[in-house]
Image (cartoon, rainbow, N blue to C red):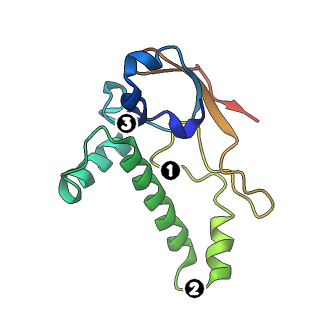
Amino acid sequence: MSAGSTGRSILSAAGLENAKDIVAIRYNKEVGVPRYEKDADVVAFEELRKKYLPNIDPDNTIAFAGYGQAVTMGEILRRCGDDLTRANVLKHATTLAGFHSPYFLDGINYSYTPDDYTPMKTLYVSIFNGKDWDLSGEPMTE
């Protein structure tokens, strides 16, 4: 299964019991599972969600992904300073190598460079146990 289809909100549509033993690559944390309930990034998202998005389900991984993307865009704009030209935004977006999004699992960072737009080259192999993802011990790098 592709990494973009591993969220609980997606798997729930088919029934979690039907997703048991699916193998997937993963790079992201999950909201709404005990494993990450005390994770600082998940807690920060939950505080934001409660304050500004109270109608969004706390288990909505798609909303959490959007939060991670917004934080990443904020980092790009921070790096740009007052020079918000297309060229400068592109320069900083393509030099994110090493930046860790709050949406990412530990050990996963962006790998963008000006010559390689691959977003990440390190991923976890995982198996869905019917309730949560069992991650491989260490992430694998291309």
Calculate the distance from the C-alpha at mark 1 to the C-alpha at mark 2: 23 Å
What residue is disc 2 on? 83
Residue type of the residue flagged with mark 2: Asp
What residue is disc 1 on? 101
Q: Is residue 1 visible?
A: yes
- Relative to 13, residue 104 above or below: below
Taking the spot 31% from the left edge, 49% from the top edge, the residue there is 44
Graded by Cα atoms within 10 Å as few (under 14), some (14 to 19) or many (20 or more), the crowding at tag 3 reads some
Calculate the distance from the C-alpha at mark 3 to the C-alpha at mark 1: 20 Å
Residue type of the residue flagged with mark 3: Ser
What residue is disc 3 on? 9
Label 1: element kind = loop
Q: Is residue 27 visible?
A: no
The location of residue 112, given as percent across then percent down, is: 69, 56
Left or right of 94: which side holds 137? left
Residue type of the residue flagged with mark 1: Ser
The location of residue 127, given as percent across then percent down, is: 54, 18
Marks 3 and 2, the one that precedes in the sequence: 3
Point out the image quarter for the C terminus. top right
State the residue in front, 87 or 12.
12
Label 3: element kind = helix
Q: In the picture, residue 124 is in which quadrant?
A: top right
State the residue in front, 83 or 6.
6
Calculate the distance from the C-alpha at mark 3 to the C-alpha at mark 2: 38 Å
Left or right of 55: which side holds 127? right
